Image (spheres, helix red, strand yellow):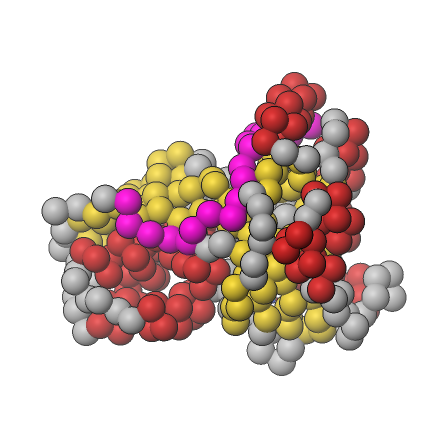
Amino acid sequence: MTVVARAPAKINVLLAVGPLRSDGFHELRTVYLAVGLHDTVTAGPGEGLALTVSGEGAGGEVPVDGRNLVWRAAELLAAHAGVRADATLHVDKSIPAAAGLAGGSADAAAALVALDALWGTRAARSDLLELAARLGSDVPFSLLGGVALGTGRGEQLAPVLTDRTWHWVLGIAGEGLSTPAVYAELDRLRAAGRVPDGTQLLPAEPVLAALRSGPPSALAAALGNDLQAPALGLRPELRRALRAATDAGAVGALVSGSGPTVAALAEDERSAVTLAATLAGEGVFRTVRAASGPVPGARLIS
Ligand code: C5P
């Protein structure tokens, strides 16, 4: 018997970053949106753990041992449920790695769902969310999906209402960026007084109001990401990528999470297709994908 689960990529339509906490994390106020770009995890019987990866980031960028969140998810769920961590796992990635799209978190969330089914451990939803939070700040959202306000280090979630499907074009420019490096660059810019110090977090209300009732121009005006300045600092060519997105007709654009993905908001589905085609033809981005959301979080598909 094998089981297959999939989990979506996310965009942070708002990512307000507070000061560095004593535990090494930053206090966040973020609004996550799950979009229709998925990784799948297939789990079957095994002796111990075995992991293979195909698709985006396979053969180098994505580790296939205990450093992979899928592996850690398996060990954590097994310990929680009191079963042996026996499984053969395969991850097929469509979400680019180290792109600010929570690809690794999606894999971990999908692994929890797949292994819970494979092992028949029937973990309570609240237990899975708690295990997810131990794996990473974004993993609970990858499990939940939809749209949610995240606080704490991003792991405390409250669902958010939206009245429509939002159409995006995701442009991945250059190599991956390390999330800790982007947070560290933000701390450096703050210490140097080059950006606000984060004691006044950006408000969520404009984004929440725009998600409730639109139109896309209102959401575009409310988008915000405190990690954009440090991502631009580490990767100056992202500035050109953001400009390319708005020049090509996006109603708004921002760096997704810690980058380097540029998330460009389109007016509607048709405009997203046109925007994706234009951006793909310009050579600014390594990969261009149209993706809309909200979509559900990690779930079994077979
Ligand atoms: O939670 P996760 O393992 O994904 O976080 C990776 C890194 O990103 C952390 O080690 C930390 O450097 C940074 N981070 C942070 N504040 C957060 C979330 C992540 O500083 N709220």
Q: Is residue 288 above or below residue 89?
A: above
Instruction: State the residue at coordinates (34%, 61%).
Output: 72
Quadrant of the snapshot with the C terminus = top left
Instruction: Give yes or no for residue 293 being in the magenta stretch.
Output: yes
Task: Please indicate, yes or no, whether residue 152 appears anywhere in the rendered image.
Answer: yes
Closer to the camera, 117 or 293? 293
Q: Is residue 145 left or right of residue 272?
A: left
Residue 36 locus on image (x, y percent): 48, 41
Instruction: State the residue at coordinates (70%, 64%).
Output: 204
Q: Is residue 196 left or right of residue 153?
A: right
Residue occupying the far right of the picture: 193
Residue 222 locus on image (x, y percent): 75, 53
Q: Is residue 63 left or right of residue 288?
A: left
- Magenta residues (range): 284-301
Q: Is residue 237 left or right of residue 142?
A: right
Instruction: State the residue at coordinates (30%, 57%).
Output: 113
Closer to the camera, 177 or 12? 12
Q: In this figure, what is the number of numbered marks?
A: 0
Residue 156 locus on image (x, y percent): 52, 71
Residue 215 locus on image (x, y percent): 70, 45
Instruction: State the residue at coordinates (21%, 47%).
Output: 3
- The picture quadrant where one finds residue 83 is bottom left
Residue occupying the far bottom of the picture: 22
Task: Please indicate, yes or no, whether residue 184 appears anywhere in the rendered image.
Answer: no
Closer to the camera, 108 or 51? 108
Instruction: Give yes or no for residue 241 being in the magenta stretch.
Output: no
